[in-house]
Amino acid sequence: MQPNEQDESHDNELARAAAEAWERLRPHLGTIAAVAGLALAGLAGWSLVSSQRDAELAQGWTECIDAVQRRDTARLGEVADRYRGTSAAEWSRVLLADAALDEGCALVFSDRKAGLERLNAAAELYAAVNADRPRGLAAERAIFGLAKANESLGKLADARRGYETLAGEYPASPLRGLAEARARELGGESAARWYDWFEKRDATTAPTTEPAAGSAAGEPAAAGDAGSAPAAGD
């Protein structure tokens, strides 16, 4: 067979193969077209949802930051509810817990009942955030905040476990050093004595006659920490 004849024979075989493939596919062309259409529609839908989610996330952060600047806790609560499942909502809840912790620590010296209510509210808020398994710095702040709230409530064992959890699970956290220090201090007798004195004192009396050992029970929270527990020296 000459080269031209071989080429023609090869072309004929390809043509027959193509024709046979077409005949096999023809009964299913409608299904194939439908599947392809669905795939394209899905891709377009995913792109639309993705862009909507991006816009929603950006709007959530805008409202969260605005609420923080205005010190508007009610609006923070709205952001947490409206944008549930987003990082903006997650941080709004952490900031609401921080606000409750700060308020409780301030009130507990002048209005014990009101202060304890706010501290318990803070603990519940932090616990709710932790239950949703946040990631990154939000998780660190929620664990640390819950430990601070428990410390302020005199739940020293729970507080110590919280500090140890933070230090163990987030060794690179900027809060690790403070958490380790608080865990060590809460494990000492001086901390137990100070909190025992604090629990028994009259709520309307300023803590100026605390036991000398109280100075070892803790240090004021560092700037930017979640709240400031009523530890000795605060």
Image (cartoon, rainbow, N blue to C red):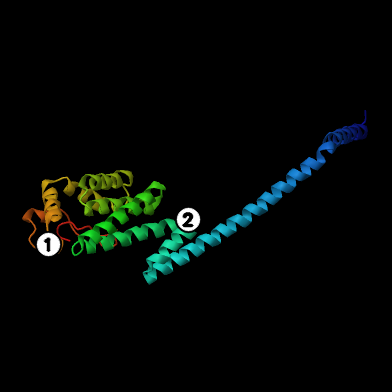
In the figure, residue 34 lies in which quadrant? top right
The residue identified by callout 1 is 207
The residue shown at (45%, 63%) is 78
In the figure, residue 165 lies in which quadrant? top left
Q: Quadrant of the C terminus?
A: bottom left
From this view, report whether residue 96 is shown above or below residue 135.
below
Q: Is residue 42 left or right of residue 113?
A: right
- Kind of residue at disc 2: Arg
Tell me, for residue 84, which label it has, or none: 2
Specify few, some or many for label 1: CA neighbours under 10 Å numbering under 14, 14-19, or 20 or more. Answer: some
Tell me, for residue 98, which label it has, or none: none
In-front residue for pair 108/170: 108
In-front residue for pair 114/207: 114
The image shows a total of numbered marks equal to 2
- Residue farthest toward the bottom in the current orientation of the protein: 70
In the figure, residue 72 lies in which quadrant? bottom left
From this view, report whether residue 119 is shown above or below residue 157.
below
Q: Is residue 158 visible?
A: yes
Which comes sooner in the sequence, label 1 or label 2?
Answer: 2
Give x and y (percent) for residue 213: 8, 53
Q: Is residue 128 left or right of residue 183?
A: right
Q: Is residue 159 left or right of residue 46?
A: left
Question: What element does badge 2 sit on?
Answer: loop
From this view, report whether residue 188 is shown above or below residue 18.
below
Q: Quadrant of the N terminus?
A: top right
Badges 1 and 2: C-beta atoms under 8 Å apart? Answer: no
Task: Measure the C-alpha gap from mark 1 to mark 2.
Answer: 41 Å
Q: Is residue 88 visible?
A: no
Give x and y (percent) for residue 152: 22, 54
